[in-house]
């Protein structure tokens, strides 16, 4: 794949730790200039994938290519990275820490200082520039690390669970930054288990479960392809007909029952079953699925209990 086509590509990548397979035969192609979300539960392999992209880990099988090159070291100035395991030099002052990392990424000191001060002002940290990092809250430290990841205007930004530990206001700020970078031509790849944020930010998504890719593609195209899998129903009578192997889960909302069908199930068969049951059906409508619904449909309701706690999608009833 040429550099012009893809910022990042993984081909047949497998990574093992002792007898545990963390990533299995994984393929991914991220076009330049898009925002792509790696979505999955904790432990699904997202962080391992990102560490292989950054050259921290090396695949046991397959290849990783960044801007068409195998060696990440040669691309260092073009990449920004915010790891899942946050870490700062706690005794350093905030501005000094940012400047240190900006120089590592190839910036001239004067340019780095000017950009650092602009970012500190944008993130309302100007008064903390000369404070030691250990004096900052965890959220403030994450902001400093984010500045360090984007200060050199990377062409590819890798964010591993970037919203973890941030309050809602700071999450909104980070979303704005991600969108700004993408609008200015950067490729952004971030991992998350928060489907609602991924849905707001991503043009492309890659769903991961148990170390394997489940689904990948343009989000709008995936939603269009999955439209027949989610049905909104208003009815009176017994709901026994809403139980069966063709139904992944149901959700009640304001008198409407949303039914998430299993992959390959026919919504017409569900309607037929409802009519035969004697239920009085007022509404039976195919609706656009949420990203959460698509994930549940392909991974299975038993795998996504932690997502159901924080997301608004259909929850399992069987």
Image: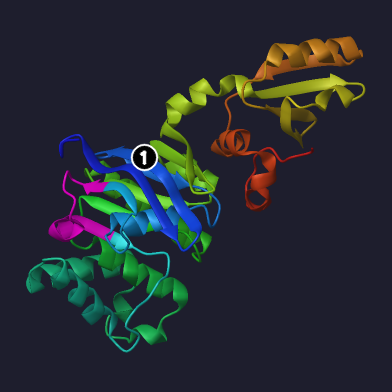
Expressed as whole percent of the image width and height from the top left, the position of residue 159 reads 36, 57
* Front residue of this view, candidates 126 and 197: 197
Q: Residue furthest bottom?
A: 91
Which residue matches tag 1? 27
Expressed as whole percent of the image width and height from the top left, the position of residue 194 reads 53, 50
Expressed as whole percent of the image width and height from the top left, the position of residue 81 reads 30, 61
Q: Residue at x 83, y 15 (%)?
A: 274
* Front residue of this view, candidates 27 and 91: 27
Q: Residue at x 30, y 58 (%)?
A: 58
Q: Residue at x 27, y 47 (%)?
A: 63
> For numbered disc 1, what is the local secondary structure?
strand
Report the magenta residues as a range. Answer: 64-80
Q: Residue at x 27, y 49 (%)?
A: 181
* Front residue of this view, candidates 110 and 37: 37
* Res 124 seen here: no
In the picture provided, is 222 more to the left or to the right than 78? Answer: right
In the picture provided, is 229 more to the left or to the right than 284? Answer: left
Vertical order, 276 against 161 (above or below) = above
Vertical order, 286 against 139 (above or below) = above
Judge whether residue 201 is colored magenta.
Answer: no
């Amino acid at each position: 794949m040429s550099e012009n086509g893809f910022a990042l590509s993984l081909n047949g990548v497998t990574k093992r730790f002792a007898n545990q397979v963390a990533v299995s035969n994984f393929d991914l192609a991220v076009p330049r200039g898009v925002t792509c979300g790696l979505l999955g539960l904790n432990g699904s392999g997202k962080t391992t994938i990102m560490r292989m992209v950054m050259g921290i880990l090396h695949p046991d099988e397959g290849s990783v290519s960044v801007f068409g090159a195998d060696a990440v070291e040669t691309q260092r100035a073009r990449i920004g990275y915010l790891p899942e395991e946050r870490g700062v030099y706690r005794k350093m002052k905030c501005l000094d820490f940012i400047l240190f990392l900006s120089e590592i990424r190839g910036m001239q000191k004067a340019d780095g200082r000017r950009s650092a001060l602009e970012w500190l002002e944008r993130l309302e940290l100007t008064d903390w520039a000369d404070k030691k990092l250990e004096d900052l809250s965890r959220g403030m430290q994450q902001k400093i690390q984010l500045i360090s990841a984007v200060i050199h205007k990377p062409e590819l930004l890798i964010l591993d669970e970037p919203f973890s530990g941030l309050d809602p206001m700071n999450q909104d700020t980070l979303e704005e930054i991600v969108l700004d970078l993408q609008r200015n031509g950067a490729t952004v790849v971030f991992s998350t288990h928060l489907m609602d944020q991924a849905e707001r930010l991503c043009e492309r998504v890659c769903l991961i479960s148990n170390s394997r890719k489940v689904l990948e593609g343009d989000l709008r195209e995936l939603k269009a392809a999955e439209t027949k899998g989610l049905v909104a129903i208003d009815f009176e009578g017994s709901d026994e007909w809403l139980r069966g192997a063709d139904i992944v889960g149901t959700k009640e909302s304001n008198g409407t029952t949303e039914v998430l069908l299993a992959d390959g199930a026919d919504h017409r068969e569900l309607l037929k079953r409802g009519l035969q049951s004697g239920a009085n059906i007022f509404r039976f409508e195919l609706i656009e699925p949420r990203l959460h619904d698509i994930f549940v449909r392909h991974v299975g309701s038993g795998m996504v209990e932690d997502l159901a706690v924080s997301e608004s999608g259909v929850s399992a009833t069987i």
